[in-house]
Image (tube, rainbow, N blue to C red):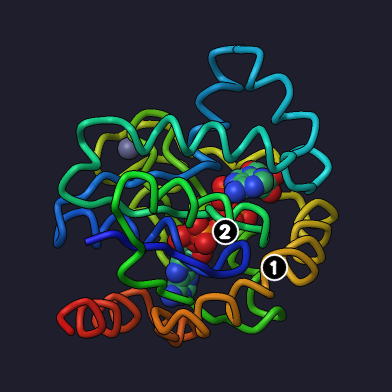
């Protein structure tokens, strides 16, 4: 199954992705995670991406499209894949359609995780990530048993650089102007499924599982 996770910053895409991966056994392709890995490794791509991410802006389409096109050629995508945070503009969505049609593939479902803007700031500023295993937690909504320490692997928890309130506000503006139009784009293609992302993590996962059964 070929899946797209759509939704504003902090909607819970990464959180739900970790459950979907278990269920569907498909690779989780998060463009944000790929950029953060490149920043950590100090690659040229990382340096370029960081200059946009720090400002809460989208990385230019040509950079992201090339990256995803390459990633979709990996063997592990043969049995399906899940894109998280891509596409994020109409240009990216159209480029993806074209790239997939060349390899006789299509998107089966777009899960649109909808959450009101006023909840998102709280979700993002409270987010904590494990330095060691990458697990995502939340200071209030999904707290670790011991403050600052990952439950899974005892790694140290940290906050993402772009999770400061001023940057989050800019990310939300980018989402509304550039990414929100994709909801209509995929609705017209008949693959959009709306998910109520405002409920608890388990309830949202349940709704997604039901949607993926159909
Ligand atoms: P990216 O890493 O994709 O960030 P994002 O889309 O802004 O989304 P987030 O990762 O912030 O949120 P999420 O939906 O994954 O939420 P999470 O599950 O963590 O992109 C970062 C940057 O990279 C972009 O700004 C851009 O610069 C660049 N970039 C990436 N892709 C690009 C592209 N295609 N084109 C151009 N540029 C690109 O959850 C958030 C928090 O809430 C967590 O703490 C979690 O525990 C908690 N939580 C989750 N679900 C619930 C729930 N149901 N109830 C309560 N709390 C919850
Ligand atoms: Mg994420
Ligand atoms: Zn960990």
* Residue at (78% x, 37% y) in the render: 52
Q: Secondary structure at mark 1?
A: helix
Q: Quadrant of the C terminus?
A: bottom left
Frontmost of labels 2 and 1 is: 2
Residue that carries the numbered disc 2 in the rendered image: 93
Point out residue 205 in the picture as x, y percentages from the top left corner.
29, 75
Which comes before the other along the chain, label 2 or label 1? 2
Classify 10 Å Cα crowding around label 2: few (below 14), some (14-19), many (20 and above): some
Point out residue 120 in the picture as x, y percentages from the top left corner.
64, 71
Q: Nearer the viewer, residue 112 or 182?
A: 182
Left or right of 89? Residue 51 is right
* Residue at (53% x, 54% y) in the render: 85
Left or right of 104? Residue 26 is left
Q: Which mark is residue 121?
A: 1
Q: Quadrant of the N terminus?
A: bottom left
* Residue at (21% x, 31% y) in the render: 75
Q: Nearer the viewer, residue 107 or 195?
A: 107
Residue 195 vs 144, above or below: the answer is below
């Amino acid at each position: 199954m070929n899946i797209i996770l759509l939704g504003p910053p902090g909607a819970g895409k990464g959180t739900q992705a970790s459950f979907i991966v278990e269920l569907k056994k498909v690779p989780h392709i998060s463009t944000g995670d790929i950029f953060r890995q490149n920043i950590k490794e100090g690659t040229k791509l990382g340096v370029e991406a960081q200059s946009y991410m720090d400002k809460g802006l989208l990385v230019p389409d040509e950079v992201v499209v090339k990256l995803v096109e390459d990633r979709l050629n990996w063997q592990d995508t043969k049995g399906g894949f899940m894109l998280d945070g891509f596409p994020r503009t109409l240009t990216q969505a159209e480029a993806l359609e074209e790239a997939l049609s060349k390899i006789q593939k299509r998107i089966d479902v777009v899960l649109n995780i909808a959450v009101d803007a006023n909840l998102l700031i709280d979700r993002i500023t409270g987010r904590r990530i494990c330095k060691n295993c990458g697990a995502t937690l939340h200071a209030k909504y999904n707290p670790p048993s011991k403050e600052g320490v990952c439950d899974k692997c005892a790694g140290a928890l940290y906050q993402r650089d772009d999770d400061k309130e001023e940057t989050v506000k800019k990310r939300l503006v980018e989402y509304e102007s550039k990414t929100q139009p994709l909801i209509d784009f995929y609705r017209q293609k008949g693959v959009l499924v709306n998910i109520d992302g405002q409920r608890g993590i388990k309830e949202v996962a349940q709704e997604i599982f039901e949607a993926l059964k159909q």
